[in-house]
Image (tube, helix red, strand yellow):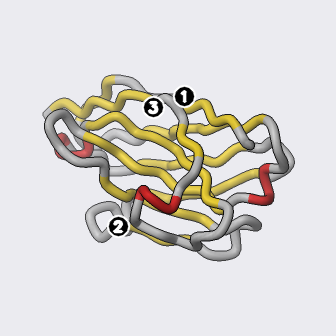
Amino acid sequence: QVQLEESGGRLVQAGDSLRLSCAASGRSFTSYNMGWFRQAPGEEREFVAAITKRGEETYYADSVKGRFTIGRDNAKNTVYLQMNSLKPEDTADYYCAASAYAVGSPDPIHYITWGQGTQVTVSS
């Protein structure tokens, strides 16, 4: 099974950009569709974006569409989340997750492996 580790989260100002990375190790990275989720304090974990095994299709939550871009580099076993025009409401812990079968699913139950998360704080 693949192991995941996120990085790149930090404190930024509204309007700034930030790129999160998720490094995978273990079983073949290309066996997995990948997703990014986020969870704000006191809130449920919510879907942000997803990408298929070879990167040919991407999916986004309406709240981030046009501002965030998900990508992956299978040669580096890494999935990225480029976040532009950040807003205070984007403040959350961000998690990457791997799914062997579900394509673009916004439901966390379809993801079998999760990273530990990286914290993003957007100040106004």
Viewer-side label of 3, 2: 3
Which quadrant of the figure has residue 4? top right
Query: Alpha-carbon neighbours of circle 3 within 10 Å: few (<14), some, or many (≥20)?
Result: many
Residue marked by disc 3: 117
**Which part of the image, by quadrant, shows the N terminus?**
top right
Task: Give the percent coordinates (x, y) of residue 123.
Answer: 18, 30
Task: Give the percent coordinates (x, y) of residue 50.
Answer: 52, 63
User: Is 63 placed above or below 93 here?
Assistant: below
**Which part of the image, by quadrant, shows the C terminus?**
top left
Alpha-carbon span between mark 1 and mark 2? 21 Å
First in residue order: circle 3 vs circle 2 = 2
Which quadrant of the figure has residue 101? bottom right
Alpha-carbon span between mark 3 and mark 1? 8 Å
* SS for dot 2: loop
| Rendered residue at 49%/29% (across/down) | 116
Amino acid type at image mark 2: Ala
Amino acid type at image mark 1: Ser
| Mark carried by residue 61 | 2
Residue marked by disc 1: 7
First in residue order: circle 3 vs circle 1 = 1
Residue 3 shown left or right of residue 7 in the figure? right
Residue 66 shown left or right of residue 89 in the figure? right
